[in-house]
Amino acid sequence: MKKLWLLLGLLVGLFFLIPLVAFTSSSDSKEDTGYQVIPDEAIRLRILANSDSDSDQEIKHKVRDEINEVVTEWVKDIDDIHEARKLIQSRISELETVVDEALIEEEENVGYTVEYGENISFPAKLYGNYLYPPGEYEAILVTLGEGSGSNWWCVLFPPLCFLDFFNGTSVAAEGEEHEVEEEEETEVKFFLFEWLGWS
């Protein structure tokens, strides 16, 4: 009987404790995961590498750094999406020059395209515990060579390129082959039942 009263007291304590823990966890979730919510009106940058070879990935990072530096300077004093959009649209040719010069500097002879649009496809990305959903977004898309390598993306406006989305986990689209880690089976023991002698 004493054990039953202890169990009842434990359950009552949990009843009051769980909402408190949930509230604390919710309020601290942004700091714990490190994610940043992307505004509905944002301009992204997506770069597709030629392949997943080390050299092609290094070139992708070189192009990323050069474009990010240039566009960040363009929009640093802009707080209106329409103004940022108009400026970027009018200077795409300058971004092509940036990519061209980066490739020349790396002595890389590979074709590329630079496009800007509102319907650039993005894959899903898991960053910490936060899922950035797939879809079509307004963005600058740079495709290097065949564009068959891993992509890198960030948000140019408002500037969120300090987040390394590349280190997030790509989520395979429906129908794509992907590896799934096998889960180890574990035996769950209900210690309260054992403690009460019910098992």
Image: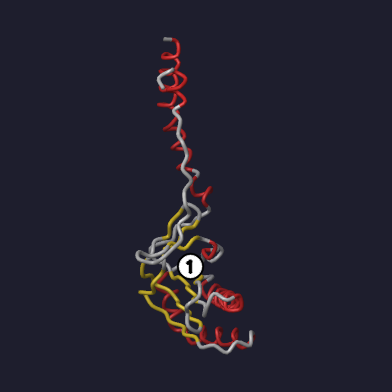
Q: Nearer the viewer, residue 172 or 121?
A: 172
Residue with the mark numbered 1: 155
Residue drawn at point x = 55 percent, y = 84 percent: 99
**Mark 1 falls on what kind of element?**
strand
Q: Nearer the viewer, residue 39 or 56?
A: 56
Residue 2, image x, y percentages: 45, 10
Colouring scheme applied when the structure was drawn: secondary structure
In the picture, the quarter occupied by the N terminus is: top left
In the picture, the quarter occupied by the C terminus is: top left
Residue 106, image x, y percentages: 64, 84
In the image, what residue type sits under mark 1? Answer: Val
Q: Residue most toward the top? A: 1
- Around disc 1, counting alpha carbons within 10 Å, would you say few (fewer than 14), some (14 to 19), or many (20 or more)? many
Image: 110 above or below 127: below
Residue drawn at point x = 58 percent, y = 74 percent: 61
The picture quadrant where one finds residue 137 is: bottom left
Residue drawn at point x = 45 percent, y = 76 percent: 140
Residue 66, image x, y percentages: 59, 78
